[in-house]
Each structure stands twice: as structure tokens, then as C-alpha cells.
Amino acid sequence: MWKSFGIVPNVVLGHSVGEFAAAVAAGILTFDDGLKLVTTRSFLVNQLPNGAMLAVKADEEIVRRLINSYERENVGKWIDVAAINSSNQCVVSGETDAILEFEKFCNSQNQKVTLIAATHAFHSRSMDCCLDSFGAVAASIQIQRPNNPITFISSTKGKAMKVEEFNGSYWQDHLRHSVQFTAALETLSAQNMDMFIEIGAQPVLTPLAMTQLPNTNGKELTFCPSMRRNEENATTLLTTLAKLYVAGAEIDWLPWFGPTRTRRNVELPTYPFQRTKFW
């Protein structure tokens, strides 16, 4: 959709399963291959026992201390760090009963936590059983070499990736290892970007990026959603297009107006007291 308005990315960054979409946007995966990886991942994970995930409002060091304390008190139970989203937010994964117990344990320590709507313990040792099968499928995918390369920042490695680094092993690590979103944002900040669009049904990553991306080149940073819950898609689209236009992006307006929509220049007043309607 955004490409139809002449908006193409210079850098892409995905969080967890969003990395597949980012790889397609960067031209590293074809759409069909990206879909194949996502469906294979879903099929294999659905064969695993259910699990749970919990957001913890604390930095990685505090979260790991909490996990160590919990595991000492509950021998045989385990909790893994699934994502490091910011300096004060991590996500943990584990078996459902362990996560529910860990939630109570955190509450007893006056540590703020929130259960996440997840069916499985993603980015944890719970994924180990399907890694070989998923890696075999991922290894069969032909990695593309786009003519106009777009920088891909991996939230698995926390760094910018080269095309040749995308292999079956990478996508295994992507499924199993923690999401290094904070490190990825640090890498993104070095790219000197000033306009950011989140692709998703609701801007979830944008607040994390807004609090962590410094203004390094003197220009105001612009953050835009693609969609919002409880808002008409056309309203969100036009608001984002307007914000990008004001920020200096070159917009191709033809897809919006189209051949059948009439366009006319409107001379607007410079003050709001004229009480004249212009549309």
C-alpha cells in the first residue's frame, strides 16, 4: 500500500514474526517464501504444548534476577527471557503453570507484570523440539539479492544483516532466541532516519521506538501508524500521509485521487476568522 504512494523504506526492522514481513519488504524473501516460512512455523509450533508469556516492567538485569530467585524456589521449573523491548520492559516465556506462578512471584516482589495473549512460549527452550524441522525448511528457501538493497536490521541479532547471513540457522535462532529489540533500535539510531512507519493493525512498537530513538541529526522525528483499532482505515491512512508530507516526504497522490476523482486547488485563508467553507 505504502509503495503505491511512492513511499519506500531505506531501512526495515521487524519484531519477532514481523521479521518475515521485513525480509519481504527488503526483497530478501519473496512473498511466497515469506508466507511458507510463517505457515511452517505456525504448523510446527501448534504441535507443541501450550505455553504462556508475561511482560515485566523492568530491565533485563532485574528480570534475570527475578527468574533466578523464582527458579531457586521452584526446582525443576524454568523461565526464559523472550524479548528485551526497552530499558524498562522485557517479556518472559515458559510453561503455563510456571508463568502463572512467576506472575504471582513478581507481584509478591511489587514488580509490575502483565500477561500477554499468547498460545505458546515463543523464543524459549519450548521451541527446541521443532528447530530441526523448521531449519530444514528455512534452508531450502532461496535468498534473494535485491537490486536496490534496503538495510535490514535484525531484532534477533540486534544488528544490520548482510544478505548472505540469512540461512536456515538464522531463522532457527529467530524462533528460539530472545528478541533483541533494544539493541536493534540502537543500530537503527545510527542510520540517521527521521521518518518511521509501523506496519501492523495497531501501533505497538512505535511507543517503544519513540522513547528510545534519539534525535541525532537535528530534525524532528516523525512516527506514523498504518492502522489503528477503533479508527477508520482511510482516516489513519490520510493522517499518516499528511504527517509524512509535512515532514518532507515525497508523496505520489495519484493513487488516492485516481483518474475518477476531481482535483482542484483551493486558496485557503491565512487566519481562521473569515468563516468561509472550503470543502
Image: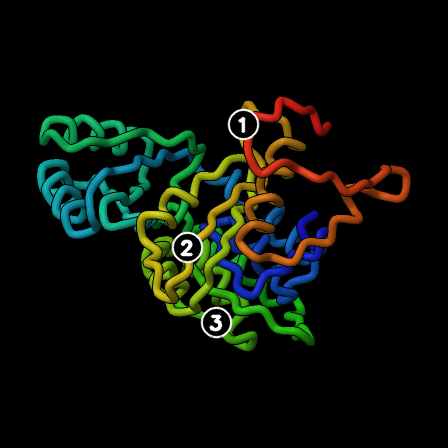
276 or 84, which is in the foreground? 276
Please name the amino acid that badge 1 sits on. Arg
The residue wearing badge 2 is 220
What is the residue that sits farthest to the front in this orientation? 274
In percent of the image, x 51 and y 35: which residue is there? Answer: 202
Mark 3: give few (<14), some (14-19) or many (20+) Cα within 10 Å: few
Mark 1: give few (<14), some (14-19) or many (20+) Cα within 10 Å: few
Q: Secondary structure at mark 1?
A: loop
In percent of the image, x 26 and y 27: which residue is there? Answer: 100
The residue wearing badge 3 is 161
Spot occupied by residue 205 in the image (x, y as percentages of width and height): 43, 44
Measure how far apart labels 3 and 1 are at the Cα level: 32 Å
45 or 238, which is in the foreground? 238
Please name which of the two marks, 3 or 1, marks the residue nearer to the observer. Answer: 1
Please name which of the two marks, 2 or 1, marks the residue nearer to the observer. Answer: 2
In percent of the image, x 62 and y 45: which residue is there? Answer: 241
